[in-house]
Structure formats: structure tokens, C-alpha cells
Amino acid sequence: MSVQVLRTFPAKLPRFPFAPRGERSIARGYGKAAGRAQRLIYVEDQYFWSGVVVSCFAKALAARPELRMILVLSTYTTSDSPMANASCLPARVQALQDLYRAGGDRVGVYGIENPHGTPVYVHSKVCVVDDVWMTVGSDNVNRRSWTYDSELTCAVLDERRDEREPRTIGADEARVFPREARLTLAREHLDRADGDDADLIDPASAFEAFRTTARDLDRWHDGGGVGPRPPGRLRSYVLPSITGPRRVLGRLAYRLADDPDGRPRSLRGTSEF
């Protein structure tokens, strides 16, 4: 496999001697991969906010009517406190609304719970594009991780072609490692046995399997949990609403602390990295 090490370092004073203007190769890697996406972008992420960051996904969805996006996110913030929710969740709502405007019902967003109904905090940072390009590392999909914090992620390109049909779902032939990574996660989230994933290879049927599983579990909960629990651990993500004075204070905390911009001043306010 070819592994490209991507990093984030902020532009700061005193300057890093090895990166005087910082480094944002993680952001650039995502931007290039999203720009090539044709059929499916799969993301698991702890945070997922900031319009300037998710714009690469929104642009891809708007440009390609066959492209779908599956997001598996944490339902709650790290501390789930009033101020944490007020600072972080409105930014996530804005980012997700950008995606919905671009892709409509081709965007599926989900949280996870365990078999007892307890929400599971998602801490993974994984992205798979068309079963060809994937990343796993420390970075979250937000401005802080892509410009400010010191981060590292590995972009993996497996040279082995995957023989399962459809062999090609994007601009290139599917590869073994990214496809199996996506299918392994899907089997876990859908409560599937090993090997029970023939319908998950094609992006359209995989997208529908996620949607159907979450819908059935949502209905079971809405009905009071009567009868056997449907298989799967996915819940449809409902956009939260934060109003009142906390939203104003939260916006300030978000800009100063939660999602700072570590780009050089010449790039701030732009969509460039």
C-alpha cells in the first residue's frame, strides 16, 4: 500500500522552522479527494463543523447528482453542557445544512447507540471516497483540526484491486483495504454478520441500507420499544436547536476557543488552505 502522511501545523509566532507558514496538507488532501468523488463519501467523525471545511463536500455533492454521502457522528458534545452545546452544535447545524442544500436526500447523517439504547460517543476519524482513497488519523473535520491543532492522518491507497462487483464505483477501480474498511464498519453499525454485505458494496444500496436501518430503529423507539428490537445501531441525526442568550455567548466561544483559524492571515476569510 502507498501511505501518504498528511499533517496540520498552525501559522504562528514564533514560526516553526520546518513550516514557517504552517502546514495544511490534511485539508488539501481532503479537498482533492472530495473533488474526485463520484458515487460515495463515507465519513465517521467526532465533531464535523465549520462551513469553510465542509465546503469541499458540499461542492462535490452539488456538482455530481450521483454522489451520496454517509456521515456517522457523535450525537452529543464531549461534555454535553449548556455552553458546550451552545458553542458547538450551531456550527454543526450550519455545516450539515450546507450539505443538505447541496445534496438533499443524498446526504444521510446518523448517530450510534449500543443494544441497550445508550448513545455511543463517536471518536473515530475515518473517510473513504469511492472505495479508493481513505484516511485514518487524529484529525477531525473542523477548522481547528485542519488549520490550528497539530494533527496527523494517513491517506492510504491500496494497490490491490477489489474483485467484488461493482469493481468501479468512481473514477478509479475499487481497492481492497478501503472497501473492506467501509464494509467492516457498515456490518458493525447494521448488526450484520461477517460476509453479509453483498448489498453494501454498491453505494446506492448501501446508502439505502443505512437509511432503512435507522428509520426502523427510530420507529421502534417512537413506539415505546414494544416488541423485538430491530437490528442495527444507527439513529437518524436530528438537527438540534440552540436559542436565546446562550447562542450568542456560544458563538463567541466557538470562534475564539472551539474552532480557531490557524491559517496565515492572507488565507483567513477565504476557502483556501
Image (tube, helix red, strand yellow):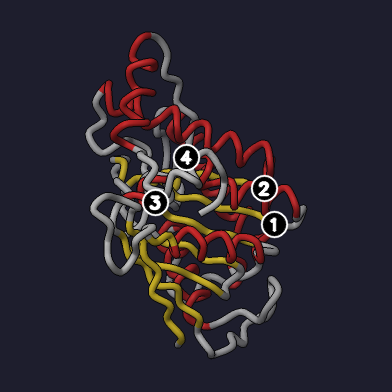
- Which numbered disc flags the more N-terminal residue, 4 or 2? 4
Residue position for label 3: 147
Q: Nearer the viewer, mark 4 or mark 2?
A: 4
Marking on residue 67: 1
User: Mark 2 and mark 3: span between their CA atoms?
Assistant: 28 Å
Give the side of residue 86 with respect to residue 234, left or right.
left
- Identify which amino acid the numbered label 4 is placed on: Ser
Q: List x then y, in percent, for residue 9.
A: 33, 58
- Identify which amino acid the numbered label 1 is placed on: Leu
Q: Nearer the viewer, mark 4 or mark 1?
A: 4
Q: Nearer the viewer, mark 3 or mark 4?
A: 3
- Which numbered disc flags the more N-terminal residue, 1 or 3? 1
Q: Nearer the viewer, mark 2 or mark 3?
A: 3
Marking on residue 106: 2
Residue drawn at (39%, 34%) of the image: 225
User: Mark 4 and mark 1: span between their CA atoms?
Assistant: 21 Å
Q: List x then y, in percent, for residue 198.
A: 59, 72
- Identify which amino acid the numbered label 2 is placed on: Arg
